[in-house]
Amino acid sequence: MSSGNAAATIRQSPAGPSSLELLRQGITDIFSRFRLIRYLTAADMKKRGSDTILGNLWWILDPLLQLVVYVIFVSVIANKAAPDYPLFIFAAIVPWKWFSAVVGDASTSVVSQGQLIKQIAFPKIVLPLSTASAGVVGFLWGLVPLGALMLLFPDRISLMLIWFPVVAIVQFVFTLAVAVLVSAANVFFRDLGNALGHALRLWWFLSPGLFSLQGLEKTGFVQHHPIVATLAGMNPFAILFEAYRAVIYGTPDGRVGTTHPPDLVALGYLLLFSLAFLALCITFFKRVEPEFAKVL
Amino acid sequence: MSGTSAYAIKAVDLGVRYTLRVRRKTTVRTSVANFVLRRPPERFWALRHVSVELSHGESLGVIGPNGAGKSTLLQVLAGIMRPSEGTVDVRGQVSGLLGLGVGFDPELSGVENILLGGAFLGIDDGKVHELLPSIVEFADLGDFIEAPLRTYSSGMRARLGFAIATAVDPDILLLDEVLATGDANFRAKSKARVIELVRAAKGVVLVTHDMEWVQEYCNRALLLEKGRIILEGAPDAVVRLHLERTAEAAEARQAAAIAAGLDPAALAGGRGGGRH
């Protein structure tokens, strides 16, 4: 259907292509349809801005409101807060909002285009990808309150912030993989959205967002079961949150002026893992894509 | 048909089987239940043993009752759906208007929808901008072309969709119930456009309930019932058979209704099909 290579289209049915071939097709789909992704991203943002009263302001307000809730809960009620606690947790809240929003939106990205999928042939993978790109814009909005909050703690601002985009890129690759996966899975399991909401909430509380990995290791339970600390450290969001915190806040003990480069080895592993995971998810997506029109 | 090398579409022994969600949406809950209870998946052949060949310059009319698999056939030919068995070979650029007037994005204007539609169909950006004036002119929507698509009537959406689908100058055009909508003026215009495409040695596959159109403008017709080909051949013969079979089915329904003690008048006519 694409005008470039549409001279002859030959399709055969029962035997599907190999996984490597599917992956190659998926990557070709992505790179040949950048314009479509751009249009869809722009349309998505336009809608988001016009459908709600506050438009893109929600990207700013939402993390701030969440911050207020956690700060009240942890520092006032539980009275266990680290120094400069708002910044400590905001370094995790904003990236998490990015991830959870993209995954939530991605889960409906294919399903909501059911009518279109039944009408024209196009690479469906552009749908979760445009959701993920729209999420980047939302994340940039989220950086506004993060920057504002940092201005309230000027002692903690350092040159280490140049590492911030590196951490964000690793997170983007991981997010992309999850987005592609849930967008396809939701076609076949329509109640996935419910399960996803709970899974995300659980994931957030198990990740060192409100606490630090170091703090977790000191608890009695974890000292009795060291395996828990190992598992907790393997959580992609443990690596990401610790990395964000290293460049924004500093060491978890709360001393000022201790910002440092993130754990690049851990980030490197996470990047490699995310790329492999993304390849797997794209292959899965391409494998089930021909069924979309039947199921929707 | 005539030569083996000249075909635009060649489908051999097509079958499309639905395994999932014939009756209701699948959920994790029902899937787990099915797995635990070892229920076999529900299966249903929407299309089976269907072979179609279309040469360039031919116009094939596909007719049949609702649920016969007509739209499924078009979806397979358009590459939207992969067949469960058999092979499809399509030569040339395909453009289709399957199902009506959903458009691409209801929040965007007509012009923006044309650009987005071009991107969905994989047409180069330059080409879309080049085609834009002719699409706008053909759709003939006046000032509405700048208004969001959600403000359009269904006829207006159909016009825009038809204008986009045919503007790309496809080698093969697939149309599903398109000619039934729009006002008389637009119907005449779209008929003229389809005839033009057929003359320009393009292949057209058309799903319709408009028997007159099939007899007048198609050079072949295909009658589908319950996913099988009943008859393929000259439009007149195929249309005649279709009308006979719908009349028979209506009579059978009426007889069954009388046998069941219902008032036959309430069911009279049923689905009458076209005239002639």
Image (cartoon, coloured by chain):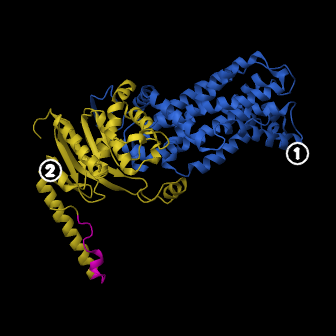
Chain colours: A blue, B yellow
Q: In the image shown, does A217 or B210 lie closer to the viewer?
A: B210
Q: Residue at x 70, y 17 (%)?
A: A162
Q: Mark yes or no: residue A292 visible.
A: no
Q: Subunit of mark 1?
A: A
Q: Is residue A144 left or right of residue B175?
A: right
Give the percent coordinates (x, y) of residue B64.
23, 57
Measuring from the top left, give residue A164's x and y in whole percent: 69, 22
The prevailing secondary structure element of the residues shown in magenta is: loop
Residue for point 55% across, 27% down? A275
Secondary structure under the numbered disc 1 in the rendered image: helix
Which region shows up in magenta? B259-272
Report the quarter where the N terminus of chain A lies: top left
Residue B48, x across and y down, in percent: 26, 52
- Mark 2 = which residue? B216
Is residue B154 or residue B12 the one in the foreground? B154
Q: Amino acid at mark 2?
A: Glu
Instruction: Quadrant for residue B68, please give it.
Output: bottom left
- Name the amino acid, label 1: Ile
**Residue under circle 1?**
A77
Q: Residues within 10 Å of mark 1 (few under 14, many from 20)?
A: few
Q: On the rendered structure, is B213 left or right of A36?
A: left
B225 is higher (above) or lower (below) than A174: below
- Point 60% across, 25% down: residue: A271
Residue B194 included in the magenta stretch of the image: no
Q: Nearer the viewer, residue B83 or B138?
A: B138
Q: Nearer the viewer, mark 1 or mark 2?
A: 2
